Structure formats: structure tokens, C-alpha cells
Image (spheres, helix red, strand yellow):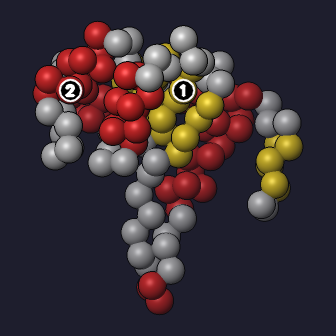
Amino acid sequence: MAGRLVVLGLGYVGLPLAQAAARAGWRVDGFDVSNRVVQSLSAGASHVDDLSDADVAEMLELGFRASTDPGVVADADVAVICVPTPLGDGGAPDLDAIAAAAPLFFDTRGVSQAPGVVRL
């Protein structure tokens, strides 16, 4: 196995990434704040257009797990944040979801952060 990956955000970007990583041999956990999304994926049902229910079933067979528990990031080798960044007023991306997701990874691993810098 390549390692353990956690994908934070299981939407139209995160779910296909999780699929590709699982197919490549990574142990993949997905985190999402939506109970509905996690329950659907855990039951083998896709909620995104690009993946079918059969794709999700294959991911589950490969060991993919979806969770609303932020603790899943605790022993990840790699964490990828795939959350929405809609355009806000003035056309700039709204980074609030990234700002909310980043501490889930940093806080569970004892990592400190500063603007533009991550210190282990």
C-alpha cells in the first residue's frame, strides 16, 4: 500500500480523488460534515454525477471509509482539503471552508500553523 490518505470534503472534487487514490492502492478515508453524504456513501450510493453507485461500491471494497468524525485525520500520511470555494463579493474566492477544514488536520496532529506557513 502507498500510505493512508484522508480527503476532507467528499463532493465533486474530493470523491473522484478518493476513488483514484483507492484504485492506486492508498488506504483512503473521507471526511465530510454532512451526515447525509457520509451515510449515502457508506451505503454504496453516489451523490455526484461523475461517479456511479458501482464506483462507490468498488471504493468500499477497496477499503474506502466515509466519516463525519474529524479524528480520521489523526494518523493520515496525507490529507487533501477539497471543500467549496465559491466566489464571494468582488469575485474573490470565499476561503471560509478551507479555514474551517485546515484545523481538523493540524489540531489532531499537534501541528502549528501561521499564515502561509505550516510548521511540524
Q: Amino acid at mark 2?
A: Asp
The residue under the point 54% across, 65% down is 95
- Confirm whether residue 32 shows in the render: no
In the image, 51: left or right of 115? left
Could you tell me the amino acid type at mark 1?
A: Leu
Q: Quadrant of residue 98?
A: bottom right
Residue 77 shown left or right of residue 88 in the figure: right
| Residue 64 x, y percent position in the rendering | 38, 18
Q: CA distance from mark 1 to mark 2?
A: 18 Å
Measured along the vertical axis of the image, is residue 51 above or below residue 68?
below
Q: Name the element at disc 2.
A: helix
The residue under the point 44% across, 51% down is 83
Residue that numbered label 1 is attached to: 5
Front residue of this view, candidates 35 and 73: 73
Residue reaching furthest front? Answer: 24
Q: Position of residue 60 (x, y in %)?
A: 29, 15
Q: Is residue 59 left or right of residue 44?
A: right
Q: Is residue 35 visible?
A: yes
Query: In the image as oriented, which residue stretches furthest toward the bottom?
Result: 90
Residue indicated by mark 2: 55
Compared with 83, 68 (above or below) is above
Q: Is residue 24 above or below residue 89?
A: above
